[in-house]
Every structure is written in C-alpha cells, then in structure tokens.
Amino acid sequence: MTKYLRINIILISFAFLFPEFACCYDKICKEFDCELAFIHDSENSIDKDSVLNATFTPIIKLPFNNGFKNGFYWIKIEVNNSSEESQNKIFEIREPYINIANVYVPKNTSLHQLYELGNKVELKYKPIKNRNLAFPICLKPGINQVYLQVNYHRNTSFLFFIKNPQEYFLNEQKAIAGFSFYYGGVIIILLVNLFFFFSFKDKAFLFYSITLASMAFGFLCLDGLLVFILPPGWLLSNIDVVSYIVLTIFGGRYFASEYLHTNKYVKHANIIESTITIVACVIFILCIIAESALLFALGLLAMIVLALYYLTVSFISLKDNLYARFFAFAYSFLFFLVLLYAVPIVFGNDILQSGSWILKIGSFIDMIVISYAIVYKMKVLNEENKKMSDSIKQYMNEIKEIKIKDIHTNRSILESDQDKLFKIKHTYSLTEREVDVLKSLMQNKTNAEIADSLYVSVNTIKYHVKNIYRKLNTNDRLQVQEEIQKVLN
C-alpha cells in the first residue's frame, strides 16, 4: 500500500512544479488597471435603472467565489484605458454555471444593453458563440464601466479576463486542440470497452463504459462545450447533475462493487452502498428542483464519501485481490485530485484552484489503468477457464481409462465365472434353467424373487429347486451352497 501512495504523491506533486498550471492565474489584463465589485440580488429585484445607485462590494481577488449563495448577481467592471486611442478587446467570463447573462454599458444617466444570453431577444450585437461567455467591447480612453447581470444556478465562481481578439482566439484554438486529444482518447477507450462487452458479454465493460460516458459529460459541462451540442434549456442547465447521478449509480454502485467484490470484505456491503447511492441521488434530484448550490455541494460530498468507501475497500483487499491494486492506484490518484481542485471550487475556497485539465489528466490515467485492469482480469479468467477445462478433460480421460480397465476386469471375471458354471453344470448334469436358478440360490434370493427375475411362476421355480436338491443330494439351500463350494475349491 505504501508503494501506491508514493507513486500517487509523485504524480500529484507534478502539478505544483509548474506554477502556471497550479494555483497561479494570469492577471485580468496586462495593459489596464481593472476593478471589480458585485451585488447579490437574491430576489432579482434590482433592474438596470436602479443598479447605478446601488452599493457594490469590491472583489478583492480572483477567482471570486461567494460560496453557496447562488442566484442573480450584478457585477461592475471598471477598466482604465490610459491610451489615447480606443481599443477593441474581448471580455471573457470562465464559468460554466451561468445560464443567464446580460451586458450593459452606461449611456447618459442610464444603462444601455449590449448583449443578452439565455433569453430569446434579438439585439443589434450578440456575444461570441463560444464555450465561455465572451463579448467584444470597445474601450475608450479613460474609465470604462461595464455592468453584468448574471444568474448562477450552481456555485458562484467568477473568473474574468480582458484579451486582445487575436490572443483570445489563439488561446481558444489551443484549448480546442487539448480537448480533441482528451475527448478523442475517451471515445477510443469507450469504444474498446463496448467492443469487449459485446465480445465477452461481461457487464463490467458495460458499467465502465457508462461510467466513462458520464465522466465525459461532466467534463464537457465544465469546459463549456455542451453549448455546441445541446440547445438552451432544462437539459443544458442540468446535464452536469444528471451525469453525476449516472456516475454515482453505475460508476459506484454497479461497477466498483462488482469489480472489488465488496461483499467479501465488508459486512452488509449492499446496504451501505445502496444507502449512500440513494442519498446522493436524492440530493442531486432536489438540487435540480430547487436550483440550490448547497444541495449541489452536498451531492458531491456524498459522491466523495462513496468514492472514499470504495477506495478504502480496495486498500483492504490489496493482499488477496490482484485487481484491487489497479483500482487503488487509479482511483487514489483521481480522488486526491478531486479533493485538491474540485472541492475548493464547490465549497468556496479558492486555494489550489486550477482548470479542469488536472482532473482530465487524473481521469485519463484512471481510464487507461482500469480498462487495462478489466482486460487483464478477462485474460486471467480465460486462462483459468482453460486450465479448468484441461483439468476436466484430463479427469474425463482418466475416468474413461478406469472404465476400460473395469470392463476388462469384469470380462475376465465373467469368463472365470463361466468356467466355474460349466464345471458345475457337467458335474451334476444340470439343465440351463437349473443353472440360472442355482445362481439365484447362491445369491440368497427367495423363490418369488427368482420367479420375477426369470419371468416364470413360483411353482416352476419350486420344481427346479426340487430337481437341484435331488441332483446335488442335498435337502436345503445351505447344503446346496456348501456342495457348490466343495466343487469350486
């Protein structure tokens, strides 16, 4: 177990060797001084006319996170353009859980709406169709103000950038290239698992395929790519929670428990796993209904508890379960990354926040290791089945040889008995029927039993017995057996 922990610590520490990949974010913009402030409009009662007179709370540092207080927010952005010329920039908000965003700029004594996302309103200018909320702004010399009205239906995280158009689209191209590599690998691994499922009829491949698909949908949501796949509406807003429900059921309750054989190591494993799974699913369903960030966080916490349970079982079974070693390595790495990066984002702690790339690396390693483990398990099982089949064939051949030996032995015994019967027959001048009756007498059968075996009447048997007594010069069956023994010896 110590070896697996060491390997995972080395892999996890890799993220901290590069500050640009860990908790170090770029400045909002290298060219301008920028100040941000917010108002939590929980009742959605502040409109564009009254927001100018409202009191904003400064945002000290990014990423901004207001914990579980989701709902409508007004965000004011002040940018000081010290240049004497106007500059065209792109404002980018990296947050997948915004389903409504309105962009305003001051004009005279009121706000003028530039963009709207989430409502079907035709405006003169529209935001850039991209995975994150982005819109072009012309920054005039001096102080520029932009007001955002956004609706957070999950956690209230806010990350904001001002970029040159060329820089923005170049970064997006790099991001799309990285997404292509990751999701292309996921599709390949998914197809391979489905192929093995249809080839071997092993449900482990099917359950893991569903697990992979649900994980991929979760990352598609975090990356903001679902806007290119799904139309705006209920499904787009809640596909992340649906994927977490599927991941909890098939990734945990079915795949992990089946793969680790938890019943062997944990008493009442089915009750424990079913309880945690049901609790997590119920919380997620309530989260969809109530649109509560707190319920969303509690649902993720239940998932983490379930993952910790399976991880603990895998470490318990390391000694006598070879396949648990693969599970312990892959899932401990991914589990620690979730604790370090995903949990702080959800629970409002911006320490160690990073992009979803670090979770993708963990999940990709998990996919490769677990897929290999399943294939390796099938290989071992096939080898064991082959050995068992060979053992059965060898055992059947041994039985066949024993039967052949018995046949030869019985045949020799029968030949010996035939010689003895021939000697008795000629010594006492017995008929064929009397020999048959004599053989039954030697087996201590009654007259009725002899009659049934020879398909004659009891009186006929009595007649033959009487003749045998006369020819052997005996008076009863005991004397007959003694006389026969004298002849045979």
Image: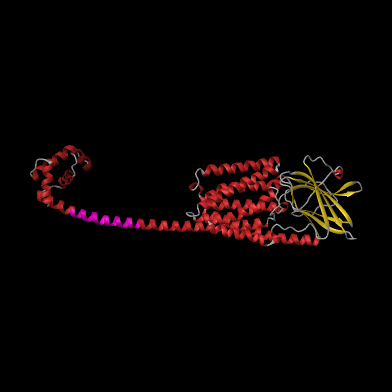
Q: In this rendering, does residue 481 appear at all?
A: yes
The extreme left residue here reads 473
Residue 412 in magenta? yes
Q: Position of residue 7 (x, y in %)?
A: 57, 60
Residue 173 covered by magenta stretch: no
Q: Is residue 137 left or right of residue 132?
A: right
Magenta residue span: 396-416
How was this image coloured?
secondary structure
Give the total of numbered labels.
0
- Asked if one can make out residue 187 in the rendered structure from this viewpoint, the answer is no
Depth order, front residue of 87/61? 61
Query: Which residue is depicted at the point 14% across and 52% down?
Result: 422
Q: Quadrant of residue 175?
A: bottom right
| Residue situated in front as seen by the camera: 393 or 272 | 272
Q: For this view, does 473 lie left or right of residue 57?
A: left
Task: Name the residue at 63% across, 50% down.
Answer: 214
Residue 277 lies, in percent from the top left, at: 59, 44
Is residue 421 rendered to the left or right of residue 124?
A: left
